[in-house]
Image: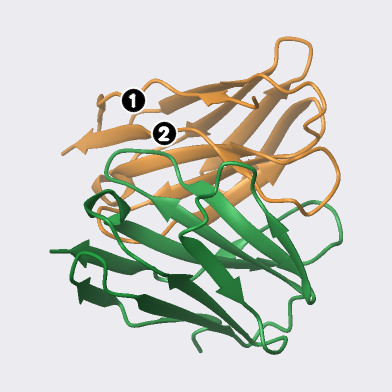
Chain colours: A green, B orange
Amino acid sequence: DAMVIQNPRYQVTQFGKPVTLSCSQTLNHNVMYWYQQKSSQAPKLLFHYYDKDFNNEADTPDNFQSRRPNTSFCFLDIRSPGLGDAAMYLCATGRTSWPDTQYFGPGTRLTVL
Amino acid sequence: QKEVEQNSGPLSVPEGAIASLNCTYSDRGSQSFFWYRQYSGKSPELIMFIYSNGDKEDGRFTAQLNKASQYVSLLIRDSQPSDSATYLCASDSGGGADGLTFGKGTHLIIQP
């Protein structure tokens, strides 16, 4: 029944070692989002896809990249994780129809050692 | 810079009472507003959204919107201990599916 799935749920990586987080959805939504949420902070939008059109937030570091090979899957790549990148990474999906209601996956907790 | 402001709390409410959560937003172009509940270590879960001035009720929850004052609130009636969580307020980008701007959330504690 899970509609937005994120893997892994917990990821531990070393400083500077690339890591990839994945998200899949069964809702057939055409928009997918990646948010970063640090402890006691608001979720912060990193980027999103309208179908295959990639939209990067202006203040998202170049260290973060994303891929969406098809409607169902989206990946977040962190090329050289720093200690400050430790956070919960949230994938969400939605439609281009209004209102912009978004449905979140369970999140991936990233630890950087 | 779009901003959504919330009092971080904690807000402590006795069981059975009404919990009142508030939020203000800076972008007058925002058209719809969302309340999400987030338990510790979990992802946000949508409670409800509102886009018209006034009140919108859904079970024990009532959202209120005042666009002139740029103010959104959420009332939880008959509060239960299971309502203890962080409540995130979010605004849209003004009509497109460009992502939401979230507040930091209010930590609500329902005391049995």
- Disc 2 to disc 1: CB gap under 8 Å: yes
Q: Residue B80 appears in which quarter of the rendering?
A: top left
Seen in the picture, residue A58 relative to A12 is either above or below; the reply is above
Q: Quadrant of the N terminus of chain B?
A: top right
The location of residue A92, given as percent across then percent down, is 57, 66
- What amino acid is labelled 2 in the image? Lys
Q: Which residue is under mark 2?
A: B104
Q: Please indicate, yes or no, whether residue A5 appears anywhere in the rendered image.
A: no
The number of callouts visible is 2
- What amino acid is labelled 1 in the image? Ser
Which sits in the foreground, A35 or A113? A113
Residue at horizontal 56 percent and vertical 82 percent from the top: A3
The location of residue A90, given as percent across then percent down, is 45, 63
Q: CA distance from mark 2 to mark 1?
A: 7 Å
Which sits in the foreground, B97 or A83? A83
Q: Please indicate, yes or no, whether residue A111 appears anywhere in the rendered image.
A: yes
Q: Quadrant of the C terminus of chain B?
A: top left
The location of residue A68, given as percent across then percent down, is 65, 81
Q: Which residue is under mark 1?
A: B8
